[in-house]
Amino acid sequence: MSTVDPAGVDEERLVRRFARGDRAAFEEFYRRTSPWLVARLRRRCADDQIVAEVVQETYLAVWRAAGSFEGAAVGGSAVGWLWTIAARRLVDAFRRRAYHAQPLPPAPNVPGAEEQALWGTVGDRVGDALQTLAPELRQVLLALVLDGLSVRETAVLLGLPEGTVKTRARRARLAMRRALSS
């Protein structure tokens, strides 16, 4: 086992090190990224139990798949890779929950808690403008602006080509400008 000197070691190098079995590198990667990951997941899910399960499943998957991380060689970041794994695990958790849940009556077209909180924070005019966006445009805009994801990370998260993300982001911004200027 080697020891990790956190100074000067980026997350991509840590992944490569724990891919070779360096447990200390994995622990350092977890220490650096888990608070961010938990905060990001809580933006998408209010259930702390699901968030905890997703975090555990994500880091287990990261440990197991570290050898397949290509990282900077293909322009990807370790944190983006981590988020991609976590987002997929969160979707899986939602699917499991929906599968085991009793069918609910159709919900009215009411925004989710995250969107309601966002609209309350940004003010009535911006909130109203966000509500007028088509769901696919709002989804891209929220990922880019609220979550602070890059175009590439948004594309991976939403399963879209990068060009589609850019197009939808531009359309969303133009629609927001129009709505806010009237």
Image (cartoon, rainbow, N blue to C red):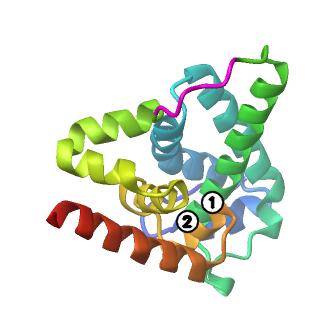
Tell me: residue 181, above or below residue 102. below
Residue 107 forms part of the magenta stretch: yes
Tell me: residue 173, above or below residue 145. below
* Chain part drawn in magenta: 105-110
Question: Which residue is denoted by mark 1 in the rendering?
Answer: 157
- Name the quadrant of the C terminus: bottom left
Splitting the image into 4 quarters, where does residue 56 fall?
Answer: top right
Q: Given the image, on which type of amino acid does mark 1 rest?
A: Leu
Splitting the image into 4 quarters, where does residue 83 fall?
Answer: bottom right
Whether residue 106 appears in this view of the structure is yes
Residue 124 lies left or right of residue 24; in this view the side is left
Viewer-proximal residue among 29 and 182 = 182
Q: Given the image, on which type of amino acid does mark 2 rest?
A: Thr
Residue 158 forms part of the magenta stretch: no
Residue 64 lies left or right of residue 42; in this view the side is right
Give neighbour class at mark 2: few <14, some 14-19, many 20+ (Cα, 10 Å).
many
Query: Alpha-carbon distance for marks 2 and 1?
Result: 5 Å
Query: Who's the residue at 62% across and 76% down the image?
Result: 76
Q: Main secondary structure of the magenta part?
A: loop
Query: Who's the residue at 68% across and 84% down the image?
Result: 74
Whether residue 123 appears in this view of the structure is no
Viewer-proximal residue among 151 and 166 = 166
Query: Who's the residue at 56% across and 57% down the image?
Result: 4
Location of residue 77 in the rendering, given as x and y in whole percent from the top left corner = 58, 71
Question: Which residue is denoted by mark 2 in the rendering?
Answer: 154
Q: Are marks 2 and 1 in contact (CB under 8 Å)?
A: yes
